[in-house]
């Protein structure tokens, strides 16, 4: 059986303005220049929606490229001849020949921005050794394997929970990862989430500032704990509804990035996420099951992401609309959504 095609959509940055298409493709996708030329000649590459006829054509900043990659392309290590590559380290993420489950919304030689679906784990960990987002990305961008901080989290700058959908940036080089991590720590990067929570918040906007750490009662959970890591979440109410049960539709901005931060902070002020089977109480879960039987994860979506490009210093801004399973919840609960 032939491998399934993978459609990669990427945008040429200003640094590639005037560059040959085949070389630009090699830089953006991680394939060899010869393979990039073959893809162009095979009609697998479109520039601004039009099939490219030559690898020598010049790119322009902002050109939208779509590349149809076969499942086995982009998986070989750089510089290794066929049949002579060394087996991967047991600790390194395996380059799985499975299609990328996340949508690539931007890619260049330094980083990749993806729109992650719910249900996809970001990197290997306890109980999730295969099929993670970074393993799929390493298969597509082999250079990412050496981006750090370690072999199981190559290129990881920040994370989204398995049940959270939305925007995530992953570095392709160690330099880019370190620069992006500094921006996250300095609050230069912006991460905004949409959330639907139980109950009606008393104020239309507010700040939750509470330290987070492992729960002393359940080590699989995060909790507000004395001596935990500082954490700040700002929220703004977008809409409220009592059509099925009292809920509030929020926009949340992370000023820090802790594990489960939005989920725990909102639960700590008495308003856990709708559908959150870890931090909502039993009565809340029962009412969700009755009114929203199709919701199988917390209503949380990473909708905005912005940062400075780690090499060019350009301002990068991305936005993502909630997927259908979440917008259907908004419809049922009578909540308005405007992108």
Image (cartoon, grey):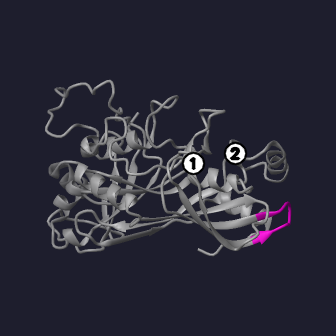
The residue pinned by badge 2 equals 279
Residue appearing at x 71%, y 53% in the figure: 272
Q: Which mark is residue 260?
A: 1
Q: Is residue 8 visible?
A: yes
Secondary structure beneath dot 1 equals loop
Query: Do labels 1 and 2 touch, CB within 8 Å?
Result: yes
Q: Quadrant of the C terminus?
A: bottom right
Q: From the top left corner, tell me how far across and down residue 139 is, in percent.
A: 33, 41
Task: In this rendered view, identify the residue nearer to me: 197 or 217.
Answer: 217
Cα–Cα gap, marks 1 and 2 = 10 Å
User: Is 241 within the magenta?
Assistant: yes
Q: Secondary structure at mark 2?
A: loop
Residue 77 occupies quadrant: top left
Locate residue 4, reporting x and y percent.
42, 42
Q: Main secondary structure of the magenta part?
A: loop
- Is 99 or 332 nearer to us in this picture? 332
Looking at the image, is 297 positioned above or below residue 338?
A: above
What span is colored magenta in the figure? 240-247
Q: Is residue 21 above or below residue 146?
A: below
């Amino acid at each position: 059986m032939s491998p399934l095609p993978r459609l990669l959509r990427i945008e040429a940055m200003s640094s590639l303005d005037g560059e040959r298409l085949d070389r630009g493709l090699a830089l953006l996708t991680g394939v060899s220049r010869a393979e990039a030329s073959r893809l162009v000649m095979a009609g697998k590459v479109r520039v601004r929606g039009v099939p490219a006829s030559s690898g020598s054509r010049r790119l322009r900043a902002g050109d939208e490229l779509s590349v149809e990659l076969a499942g086995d392309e982009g998986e070989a290590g750089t510089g290794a001849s066929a049949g002579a590559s060394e087996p991967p380290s047991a600790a390194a993420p395996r380059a799985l020949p499975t299609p990328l489950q996340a949508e690539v919304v931007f890619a260049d030689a330094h980083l990749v921005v993806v729109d992650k679906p719910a249900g996809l784990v970001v990197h290997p960990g306890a109980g999730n050794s295969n099929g993670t987002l970074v393993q799929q990305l390493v298969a597509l961008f082999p250079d990412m394997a050496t981006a750090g901080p370690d072999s199981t989290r190559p290129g990881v700058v920040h994370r989204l929970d398995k049940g959270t959908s939305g925007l995530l940036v992953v570095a392709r080089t160690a330099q880019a990862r370190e620069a992006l991590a500094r921006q996250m720590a300095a609050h230069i990067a912006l991460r905004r989430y949409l959330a639907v929570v139980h109950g009606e918040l008393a104020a239309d906007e507010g700040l939750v500032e509470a330290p987070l750490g492992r729960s002393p009662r359940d080590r699989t959970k995060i909790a507000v704990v004395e001596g935990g890591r500082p954490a700040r979440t700002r929220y703004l109410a977008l809409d409220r509804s009592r059509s099925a049960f009292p809920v509030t539709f929020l926009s949340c901005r992370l000023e820090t990035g802790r594990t489960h931060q939005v989920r725990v902070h909102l639960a700590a002020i008495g308003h856990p996420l709708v559908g959150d089977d870890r931090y909502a109480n039993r009565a809340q879960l029962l009412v969700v099951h009755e009114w929203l039987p199709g919701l199988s994860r917390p209503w949380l979506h990473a909708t905005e992401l912005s940062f400075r490009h780690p090499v060019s210093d350009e301002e990068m801004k991305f936005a993502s609309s909630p997927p259908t399973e979440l917008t259907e919840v908004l419809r049922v609960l009578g909540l308005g959504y405007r992108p």
